[in-house]
Amino acid sequence: MDMRWKNRGSLIRNALGLGLGVGLLFAATPGVAGDTTGKGCAWFDGVESCPIDASKLSATNEGLLVESTDGKQSGVSLRLEGSTSWDAWLNPLEPDGSSRMLLTYIGAKPDGTSELLERVVVARSKAEDQGAIYVDPSVHGASTYTVRGYVDGKLAFERFGVAPVPESFGGPAGPGDDAKFARLVSFPGKWGSGHSGVIAGPNGEGCTEHGLDFPFPKPVRFPDHTLSAAVNLVTFQAEGVQSDSHALREVSLQGVGLQSFTLQKVARTP
C-alpha cells in the first residue's frame, strides 16, 4: 500500500515536532484531571487514561506515573476514540532482561466495533545483546514490514521487505506470552516514546504505521545484521495488510516486570 498520502505526515510531525518540547515539561504542571469514573482513571493531556489490572495512576512533577501495586506489572490504557494518530513520551527506558513493554493498538471500525491492529513488544534481545522491537505477525498475517527512519522529521532511510525473526525474550510471565513475537530491528541504549497512526487510502481502505523514538540518534540493526543510518525515530508498517479501521480506539502500555513508568506527555490528532 502506498504510504505517500497527505494525512500520513501527522505521525511524523507529532513524533518529532512535539517531542522537542518534552524537556520543558519538568517546569510545568502536568495536565492531569481527577477520576470521574470510580475506576482510578485520570484525564492526562486531554486523554482518558485508565489503570490496567493492579496498577494505579498518580500525578507527579514529571507527568502521569503508572505504578504497579502487586510487583508484577504496571499498565495504562489510553482511550483515543476518533483519533487518527497518537503519541506518548515516556521517561526514557533501556530494555533489560528482567522487564519489557507491551504496546497494544486497537482500531475503531466504521460500524463501531473494535479491531486489533498491532501488538508490539520492546525488550532486550539475547541474540543481539541490546534492545529490540518485536512484532506479532499473527495479528494480521503479514510476513514482511516496511521500516523507515527519520532524523528531525526528514526521511533518512526506507527499507522494504524486512522479515522479522521469531525469537523469545526473557523476563517474568505476563500479558502477551501467548503471542508469537518476532524481532524486527534491534537498537542500543534507551528508547523514549511510542507513536501510531491510521492512514486512509484513496479508496477508503486503511493501514497503520507505528514507531518508537530515541533520546539521541542511533542506528538500528536489521535481522540480516546490517545497520541503518543513525536516526531518532523509526517507524514500521506491515506490508500487504489493509485494516477496516478509520481511527484509533485505544492504545495500552503494559510494563511487564516493570514497577513503574512515567508518561511525560500524550498527544492525539482528531
Image (cartoon, rainbow, N blue to C red):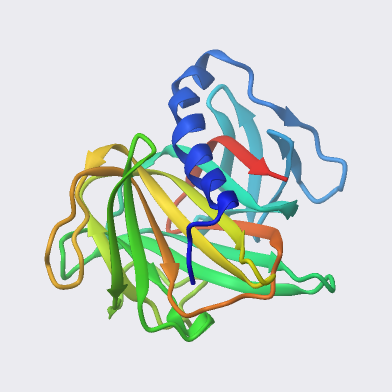
Give the vertical position of 242 relative to 124 (above or below). Answer: below
Q: Position of residue 2 (x, y in %)?
A: 48, 67
Judged left or right of residue 149, residue 222 is: left
Judged left or right of residue 180, residue 28 is: right
Residue name at image x 50 percent, y 50 percent: 195
Give the vertical position of 144 relative to 247 (above or below). Answer: below
Tell me the quarter of the picture where residue 101 sits: bottom left
Residue name at image x 48 percent, y 26 percent: 22
Judged left or right of residue 19, residue 253 is: right
Q: Nearer the viewer, residue 75 or 30?
A: 30
Tell me the quarter of the picture where residue 269 sits: top right
Residue name at image x 86 percent, y 48 percent: 38
Q: Nearer the viewer, residue 237 or 166?
A: 237
Q: Position of residue 225 (x, y in %)?
A: 12, 67
Residue name at image x 40 percent, y 62 percent: 236
Q: Nearer the viewer, residue 113 or 23?
A: 113
Residue 169 in view (yes/no)? no
Give the vertical position of 215 relative to 200 (above or below). Answer: above
Which residue is situated farthest in the front direction here?
A: 202
Task: Look at the image and tell me in which quarter the C terminus lies.
Answer: top right
Q: Position of residue 33 (x, y in %)?
A: 77, 31
Q: How many marks?
A: 0
